[in-house]
Amino acid sequence: MHRRGVMSMPEDLERKLAAILAADIAGYSALMGADEKATVRDLKAHQALVLPLIAEQGGRIIDTAGDGILAEFPSVVNAVECAVGIQKVMTERNASIPTERQMRYRIGVNLGDVIHDKQRVYGDGVNIAARLEGIAEPGGICISGAAFDQVQRKLQLPFVDIGAHQLKNITDPVRIYRIDSADQIPGAPATQPTLSLPDKPSIAVLPFTNLSGDPDQDFFGDGVAEDILTDLAKLRWLFVIARNSSFTFRGKAVDIRAISRALGVRYVLEGSIRRAGNRIRVTVQLIDATTGAHVWASRYDRDLSDIFAVQDEITTAIATAIAPAIMNAEQQRVLHKPAARLDA
């Protein structure tokens, strides 16, 4: 008999503490769109080498739907070592594959309480791992503070504290640590040097992505991005990366944080355009590229009665909104810095 007010869990379910690894391939949909058969063939070839690493580290595969991997481990040390092993294998395989066909896993690892049955695991322990995967850059690994506490003295890896984040559908903020990119894992090739951030707020405006399937619309997106650059360059308190540098990322599936390190900027503005008949939709978002957090976003729907007037209107609206958004983000960032002195 159960005590009044205490609900029992079904016999086929149980709670336990487990390390959860969640992974998926960045840009997988685009790869499938470009060449479906080749993508499926390459994925299976990669999985033939990657999936056995889970068993070698004492893990159990829960799901491999599509390009994703979900696995549980009794030890968080083994889970992180498995994540590092996966990224090392993929780095080695990608070295002989053309850039546009490379597959790069994003991996999240969390240690948490999960609900377990014979086939699957559920609960915030799993959900947090999935959110960490979404934050990780292609080829990178993010782990929760709970996982970090268990591995920091046991694994000699380049951990970087990227702060506490409010994750979708997770009540409390989660502190996140990044294993500082797969190309810094032993055995991986060296990357370009990281540029330091300037003393004042800095931003790069990327070329807007044309989602219309009509190459003629590229000029509209480029025009909006260039006009925004021109308007922002008038703000003396803001460091703006020149077009020649930011536009080199056109058409490349590059993680925002990699752009931050490559260009030495804190903020990145990216957007997309979509045309249907005589209407155009422009979606734009401002991102803190050092953490991947969204600062501001908006959408603009307009009739194309006069395309240049529409371009000017959207450009002005975006440029006007960006400045206060950056100033507010900077104020919040300073407020969250620890004071060096009690009277600061």
Image: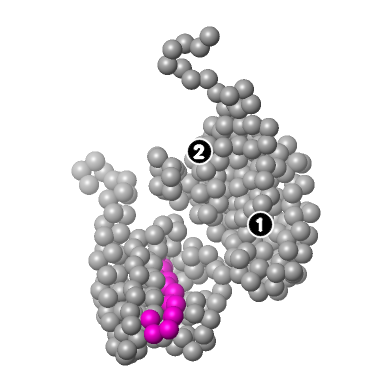
Asked whether the viewer can see residue 118, the reply is yes
Write down the residue under mark 1.
Answer: 67
Going by the image, does 142 lie left or right of 69?
A: left
Q: Does residue 41 lie above or below 8 as drawn?
A: below
- Residue appearing at x 27%, y 50% in the figure: 335
Q: Is residue 245 visible?
A: no
Q: Residue at x 35, y 89 (%)?
A: 307
Asked if residue 270 lies in the magenta stretch, the reply is: yes
- In the image, 268 versus 154, the foreground residue is 268
Amino acid under disc 1: Asp
Amino acid type, residue under disc 2 in the picture: Asp
Q: Residue at x 35, y 70 (%)?
A: 299
Q: Which residue is mark 2?
A: 124
Quarter residue 273 falls in:
bottom left
Residue 65 picture location, percent across and down: 66, 52
Q: Secondary structure at mark 2?
A: helix
Per the rendered image, the range of residues in magenta is 265-279
Q: CA distance from mark 2 to mark 1?
A: 22 Å
Q: Which of disc 1 and disc 2 is earlier in sequence?
A: 1
